Image: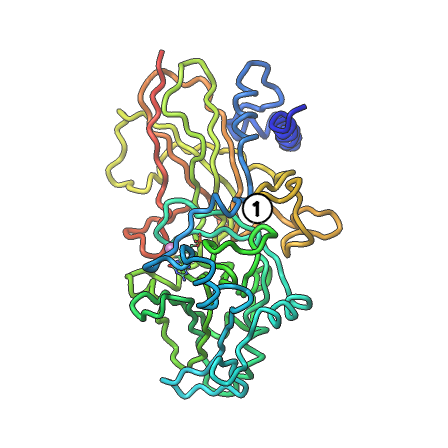
Amino acid sequence: MDKTRRVAEEHIDVTRRFFLQIGAAGAAALNVAPLWAQENESEPALADAIAKLEYLTSADKFKMFGRGNPPPHTLSPEKRREVGLDPETWQLEVVADPDSNAEVGSPLSKEVGTALDWQRLMQLAEKHAVRFLHVVTCTNGRRPCGMGLWEGVPLRDVIWLAKPTVNVRRVFYYGYHNDDPKQRFQSSLPMGRVLEDPPGEHPAILCYKLNDKWLTPKAGAPVRMVVPDRYGNMSVKWLQRIVLTNNFKANDTYAEWNNDVDSHMKTCARFILAPKKAESGQPIPVTGLAQVGMSGLSKVQYWLCSQDADLPTDDPYFAKGDWKEAEILPPPREWGGGLPGGVLPPTPRQVDPATGKPKTWPLRGTIVHWAALLTDVRPGRYHLRCRTIDANGIAQPMPRPYLKSGHNAIEQVPLVVQS
Ligand SMILES: Nc1nc2c(c(=O)[nH]1)N[C@H]1C(S)=C(S)[C@@H](COP(=O)(O)O)O[C@H]1N2
Ligand SMILES: [Mo]
């Protein structure tokens, strides 16, 4: 049996068990056609669409931002070596901010030869390495850059090596920027967030692996920051310098660019398969992803609305729409992302080591896939929209007049159904 077919059948199997769990009544209440009861050709169409969903994004399929002139990942291997972007030459500094009264007992500094090198990072990794699943999304992006399994050493473990003593309220950090201050891309975190994690949340890490492989130059090699509960701009690539400061204000490049850098990742839904055209009488398979932000996720919904419908003028966020429930798919059997056999390495923090399965589902800070089958759609021109309901029961995205704290507007696609 070829691989695609096997994966498809596994997905059908998973999906069928999922629908059996909720039962025919449940499925009817959710207003979806129970797939296990379907005998027409619609089931293969939806099963096929579901089988194409890959949970983890391999590094080469990530949408990756590499700012700089030239972008650091385009430098030749020799140049990368020269500027400390090769494991053999990489060094990370952790020093006090000369513009504040912060004090650091044992600075990790290139000047005095105490900067952290790759070998020392790998020694720390033997004891302290953590892995977690985390979706990278740009504050201004319409959909995630990619869903990754990240590995690294908690930032706090390296900060403690520098022995901060007094007056440290914030951590500034930045990476290689062609030694041109104008090209610097920096971010920052409050010291409190670095030192502790809310229950179920993960530490900010000095990351060196994506999907169990060393970071590629484009992904920020050899070491980048990954901040689990935030948008991608905090996860600075080509990391080389950390500054401990008594300054309590964010000095982030993204703040200078007029973004709300204190914003946590938002919950929202996006389409993956949304046909633009369909034949009347044919069930229409739809799939998508939902980003699970700080407020969690309880439902994904879609709304098929005639383009000629008279919508209330006082309802810009479609709160009065006739929303129907889509199915949130269970954890994948094969995680994708180029992992051999699609199997997760031991053991991401969200996964139970005994069973190899996620401890809960959906997982905050990641994505889930969802699916729906539109049936009995009459000929006409429609708008198809999707949204989420967060774990607090609140429809997301919340009505917001601006997108500076995350572009998570309700997605809308046109659909024409022909007779
Ligand atoms: N050094 C550096 N790090 C950076 C950036 C950058 O321009 N330079 N862009 C940031 C932004 S805005 C985003 S959204 C993420 C994207 O991460 P990715 O490239 O791994 O998808 O990288 C972040 N890290
Ligand atoms: Mo971004």
Residue at (52% x, 53% y) in the render: 365
Task: Please state which of residues 75 and 41 is positioned toward the viewer in this rendering.
Answer: 75
Give SS at disc 1: loop
Q: Position of residue 72 (x, y in %)?
A: 40, 59
Residue 290 seen from this side: yes
Residue at (59% x, 73% y) in the render: 157
Task: Please state which of residues 235 and 295 is positioned toward the viewer in this rendering.
Answer: 235
Residue 23 seen from this side: no
Compared to 54, does 187 lie above or below?
below
Query: Which residue is the extreme one toward the left?
Result: 313
For residue 5, side relative to residue 297 (left or right): right
Residue assigned mark 1: 362
Query: Which residue is the extreme one toward the front?
Result: 78
Compared to 415, does 89 lie above or below?
below
Q: Position of residue 283 (x, y in %)?
A: 47, 19
* Quarter of the figure that contains the C terminus: top left
